[in-house]
Amino acid sequence: MRKAWELLTSGPEDADRSVLLLPGGANAARSFDLVMAEPVLSGVRLIATTLPGMAGAPLGEDGSVPAMARRVGELATVHRCDVLVGFSHGATVALEALLSGHFRGPVVLLGISLTPEDEAWFFRAVVRASQKVGPWPMATLLRLLPLMVRSAKLPEPHKRELVADLRQNKARDSVRVSGDYLDYIAADADYATRLAAAGTPVWVVHAEKGDGGLTDAERATLQTAAQVTLVTIPGAVFLLPDEAPQQTAAVIASALSHAV
């Protein structure tokens, strides 16, 4: 039986700097394989973890964003992580870890959605429909995800791993974690303003197209914060850590340069 919060690590155990990496929805820790192999991060201890309910990992009783953020804070402490990185769902968990004080270092938020308007409408529709009629709409979406990955420009070994991980997802678990995730970003919490006021170095990264984005109001709010850096990766990118590993690693290296 698989264990919760399974880890994938690279780099020397006695490295001066370490980073905790949180994958996106439906993905496993090894979705960060290409980022971890980038030369700019050589010598850095990199620790990726599969989030509960993702890629077949055990969900447990509480798969909410706050519960995951608490556990992420514990992992970051145990592994002495200087920087926290999250993609998509993982970025939202990283955001909560920062705002709740479970993590206090630099944070990199890849493809984050701060409100439902930032998230793909079809994903929202599938999750809410699955909550009403049962998990079959989500099961249909999960069957389509490997087809999307196969069309991506990725190294074949990595592509095969991603497809294998996506096929491990369980529709009922996906509905639970995705429903909690949508509830979190739908809360009237003004995450952009709270992030701008956090006082911690933060990098918010999106592609020009494909991975969601920010509303004009959110972008304007974040641009006023001296400690927030907005990064736009050119072109259409759906899976930032997989399709843009070099740019992703470069941002992580920048975050490491700001770690105390």
Image (cartoon, rainbow, N blue to C red):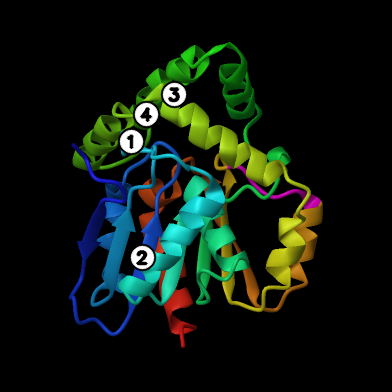
Residue bearing the label numbered 3: 172
The correct choice, above or below, for 115 with respect to 39 in the image is above
Residue linked to disc 1: 55
Task: Give the residue displayed 31% in from the left and 57% down from the top.
Answer: 48
> 57 or 16: nearer the eye?
57
Measure the alpha-carbon separation of dots 4 and 2. 34 Å
Point out the frontmost of discs 4 and 3. Answer: 3
Q: Is 229 on the left-hand or right-hand side of 77? A: right
Q: Please report contact status of discs 2 and 3: CB closer than 8 Å, yes or no.
A: no
Q: CA distance from mark 2 to mark 3?
A: 26 Å
Mark 2 lies on residue: 75
Of helix, strand and loop, which mostly describes the magenta segment?
A: loop
Question: In front of the other: label 4 or label 1?
Answer: 1
Residue 36 placed where, x, y %? Answer: 28, 61
Indicate which disc residue 239 carries: none
Give the labeled residue for mark 4: 151
